[in-house]
Image (tube, rainbow, N blue to C red):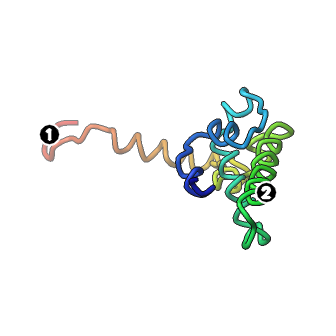
Amino acid sequence: MDSLTQRLKALSSAEDFLVFFGIEYEPSVVHVNRLHILKRFYQYLHRADDLAGLDETEMFRRYREMLNQAHNDFVKSNAVTEKVFKVFQDAEGQQHVSIKSLKDSLAERRQAAAPITPRGAAA
């Protein structure tokens, strides 16, 4: 019999993991948040300090519990609120550009795009 770790290595999608662990899931939630769910599952696994020494059955139960929680996080919330990835952690996923920097940038682009007149030529 393959170990739990070996069987998990064969899984690739969020749906694969959810089916493997027998977790009912919302397809529309998984479709939009599959990477977020897997990343959150990884975060839960990484934070768990009580996994060492568990037998395969108990390990399966704990992994299932954490994956189910990761899925439910996105049933009840969304990627922007949960901030799993860095882009959502930095400035809450928004970038700020000042009007002044836009004006300065436009002036620089206009100057760069202006035709160059050769020396001695009539303007």
- Under mark 2, the amino acid is Arg
Question: Which residue is found at the position 83% from the left and 42% from the top?
Answer: 72
2 or 1: mark nearer the eye: 2
Question: Which residue is found at the position 34% from the left and 44% from the top?
Answer: 112
Q: Mark 1 points at which residue?
A: 121
The answer to which quarter of the image holds residue 23 is top right
Where does the image place residue 79, in percent across and percent down from the top left? Answer: 73, 43
Could you say which disc has been placed on residue 62 in the image? Answer: 2
The answer to which quarter of the image holds residue 90 is bottom right
Dot 2: element = helix
In screen coordinates, is 16 left or right of 112? right
The answer to which quarter of the image holds residue 120 is top left
Where does the image place residue 109, in percent across and percent down from the top left? Answer: 41, 43
Could you say which disc has been placed on residue 39 in the image? Answer: none
Dot 1: element = loop
- 59 is higher (above) or lower (below) than 7: below
Given residues 38 and 11, the one toward you in this image is 11
- 29 is higher (above) or lower (below) than 62: above
- Under mark 1, the amino acid is Ala
Label 2 crowding class (10 Å Cα cut-off): few <14, some 14-19, many 20+?
A: some
In screen coordinates, is 43 left or right of 6? right
Kindly give the residue lying farthest to the front in the view shown: 1
Q: Earlier in the sequence, mark 2 or mark 1?
A: 2
Where does the image place residue 99, in percent across and percent down from the top left? Answer: 64, 45
Distance Cα–Cα, label 2 vs label 1:
80 Å
